Image (cartoon, grey):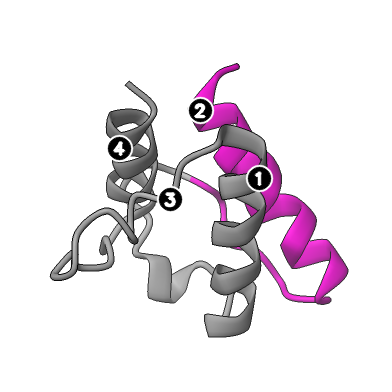
Amino acid sequence: MDVKSEVIAQFTQVAQEQSKPLAPLTDDLALFESGLDSLCFAIVVVRLEMSLGVDPFSAEEDARFPATLGEFIGYYENAAK
């Protein structure tokens, strides 16, 4: 399974379900400018854990939330290795 495709699919699906306008999904997109709110991100993280079998944010106590979509995807790619 391609991690990047799954992340983008979940962002898109959650935005549609929550009626949120979604910015163009590029690697340098700042997550706070994506159009998703904190509830949306929580839903995305839970769904990615279910589909990919990893949660990179629970692995470390002091893990910081990524600033860009590219960093977000990178967290999942590294955790899935």
Q: Is residue 52 left or right of residue 26?
A: right
Circle 2: element type: helix
Q: Residue beneath label 1, please?
A: 50
Mark 2: amino acid: Val
Give the magenta part as a residue range: 1-25
Residue density around tag 3, few if under 14, some if 14–19, many if 20 or more, within 10 Å: some
Residue density around tag 1, few if under 14, some if 14–19, many if 20 or more, within 10 Å: few
- Measure the C-alpha gap from mark 4 to mark 3: 12 Å
Mark nearest the camera among 2 and 1 is 1
Quadrant for residue 35, please give it.
bottom right
Mark 3: amino acid: Asp
Q: Residue at x 44, y 43 (%)?
A: 26
Residue 15 percent coordinates (x, y): 73, 65
Question: So how many labels did they put on this image?
Answer: 4
Q: State which tag comes first along the sequence, 4 or 3.
A: 3
Q: Residue beneath label 3, please?
A: 55
Q: Residue 74 carries which label?
A: 4
Q: State which tag comes first along the sequence, 4 or 2.
A: 2
Q: Would you say the residues marked 1 and 3 are in contact, meaning their CB atoms lie under 8 Å apart?
A: no
